[in-house]
Image (spheres, helix red, strand yellow):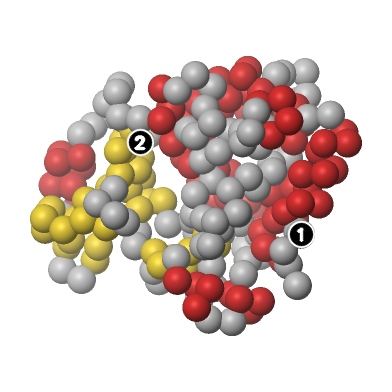
Amino acid sequence: MAQNLKIKTILWDSSYSTAETVEMMMTYSKSLVRETDVATYMKEKGYVHNGAHFDGNKRTVWTKGKSVLTVKAARDWKEHNGPNNGFMRVFMHNVLTKLHEHNPIYGWDDSLVDALFDGEALYLINKPYSEQWRCADVERTTPRHWTIPQLHYLGLYAADIANKAQNMAIVEGQPDFAVPVDLDATWRGSPTTGSAFLKTLPMEIRIQKMEGNYAHIK
């Protein structure tokens, strides 16, 4: 954190409200994205759109030989203060990458390859992933034992682990266990009691949220 003061402020400085923190997160994330369009980006990388779609037509599929990338347009950042925000994915990818570079046993590959921004839509470019990890040994494949402590240390509440796949997936080319791939919630329920940024919550709610993240681990 000492080497990443902007991230430290976003995650740990409790003098900022949820709305102010989200704004800082977005400003930081916009400095990381590429200002180009999808077609230009893919042409430069040697990928072509094969006409297919992925994840219920939410994503377009681009291929280069056997290599596959998917693209999703995320406009949810335009909602007033969330609760979903595609720039949160960009931010978390950057944080997790830095964490992994600091120590290889921390952080994880969340499937994000790049992000493009044209002023209206944020385009998230991902490697393919599978959400069918729960078909296998759940206790072996669930990442909660080691990812949630990392998120809590960073000051983040894992708000989206309630659905069947728990917004986790097995990323192509990575070890055969799931990791969080959809950390885009800035809050759930309300910013006051459900902020993803633990620093903004009263202590008793903060403890309750963190305990809840472990509730379904056997």
**Which residue appears farthest toward the right when viewing the image?**
204
Q: Which residue: 49% across, 49% down? A: 182
Query: Disc 2 to disc 1, how far (Cα)?
Result: 31 Å
Relative to 69, is 114 on the left or the right?
right
Mark 2–mark 1 CB contact (< 8 Å): no
Which one is closest to the eye, mark 2 or mark 1? Answer: 1
- Which of the image's four quarters has the N terminus? top right
Residue 159, x across and y down, in percent = 63, 45
Amino acid at pointer 1 = Ala
Relative to 130, is 211 on the left or the right?
right
Q: Circle 2 sits on which residue?
A: 74
Q: Is residue 28 above or below residue 108?
A: above
Q: Secondary structure at mark 2?
A: strand
Residue 75, x across and y down, in percent = 35, 30
Q: Is residue 109 above or below residue 188?
A: below
User: What number is the disc on residue 6?
Assistant: none
Q: Is residue 183 visible?
A: yes
Q: Is residue 174 visible?
A: no
Residue 181, x across and y down, in percent = 49, 54
**Nearer to us in this view, 49 or 82:** 82
Residue 139, x across and y down, in percent = 66, 76
Q: Secondary structure at mark 1?
A: loop
Amino acid at pointer 2 = Ala
Q: Which residue: 20% across, 71% down? A: 66
Q: Circle 1 sits on which residue?
A: 215
Q: Earlier in the sequence, mark 2 or mark 1?
A: 2
